[in-house]
Image (cartoon, grey):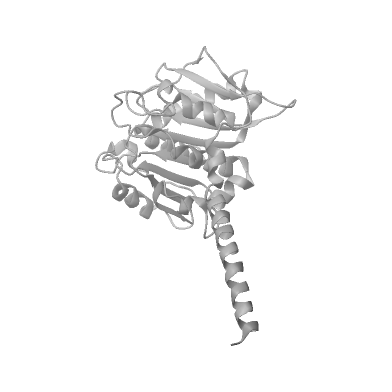
Amino acid sequence: MNLAWIGRSLARLALTAWLFPLLGAFALAQGRSAERFGQAGPYEITVVQQPLCCDGKGNGVELYLPRPRRAGETFPVVTWGNGTWAKPDKYAFLLRHLASWGMVVVATRDSSVGTGETLLDALALAERSDKALLMDRGRIAAIGHSQGASGAFNALVAKPSIKTAVLFDLPGRRLCNREHCAQIPGGLREKQSVLFLSGEKDPLSSSEMVDAYFGEVPAGRLRAKAAVVEADHNDIQGQPDCPSFAIGCRKGIGAFLPYATAWLRWQIAADKAAAAVFSGRDAPFSRDPLLTGAVIAR
């Protein structure tokens, strides 16, 4: 019996037994690196109680503002589009969250925003207001929910200085007003990007519907998509959980939050930690068990 060989084998087994759990813990930690963006950001926020007046339809515009931590600090800007019949209060948790991560959020009270015009009106009003000094006009995103998702994309197409769009629960092409969806996604310019997020159980924005849009994005454009497991059409309205008897809300905003925030921080704030959420073969976005069908492509 070769005692030396047995000793070396036992040593290798012991090393393996110690190393594998460590590697597993490291992989798990990597997979959870997106979680920090689901927590409140480092900025205190101010919500402007008296909205700016008015967009092209006479609606007021609300502002969610990070409080500067040094003189002259400016912030990227997000213009928000509500879902049909909804107002910004339905999305207050999300809008406050984005402001806490150092983004000025501009939110029209229009509840029929599919063409994107009132998202641009809201942006222009904010740029003419006394809060304009907080805004970095070279770093702008458009985001929205349901009909507001089509509005966000149309704002992106209409204004080349908008860098990216995040589309929550964009209705499938057969369900989307033709005027609202005619340019989705073919109007995306070379240096613009888009993130599609939907609920796995959303009948209005099913995986098949989102896949169809995703497959039509012109080559060379950065795009990503994923569905949140077990979520429905209105989970993005969670505060953060679903309100009692909420129609179309199963889980709350949960898994939507870190990826929407990280995408925006990456695309309009050049945040390297946020970029890492979507970068590389083992990107957390691609491996999160709370997401299904996650793909990043260019």
In this view, the residue farthest toward the bottom is 1
Identified at 46% across, 35% down, the residue is 143
Quarter of the image for residue 13 reads bottom right
Question: Residue drawn at (42%, 50%), measured in percent from left and top?
Answer: 289
Above or below 41: residue 221: below
Locate residue 279 relative to residue 184 in the image: left or right: right
273 relative to 207 in the view: left or right: right
User: Which residue is pictured at 48% across the width and 19% down the height?
Assistant: 61
Q: Residue 161, can we see it?
A: no
**Residue 265 locus on image (x, y percent):** 58, 40
Q: In the figure, 255 relative to 16: above or below?
A: above
Which of the pair 52/269 is nearer the observer? 269
Q: Is residue 126 left or right of residue 167?
A: right
Q: Residue furthest front?
A: 1
Q: Please identify the quarter of the rendering in which residue 231 is found.
A: top left
**Where in the figure is residue 29, as x and y percent of width and height?**
56, 50
Residue 23 percent location from the top left of the image: 57, 60
In front of the other: 76 or 276: 276
Q: Quadrant of residue 89?
A: top left
- Position of 6 relative to 169 (above/below): below
> Which of these two is toward me, 119 or 148?
148
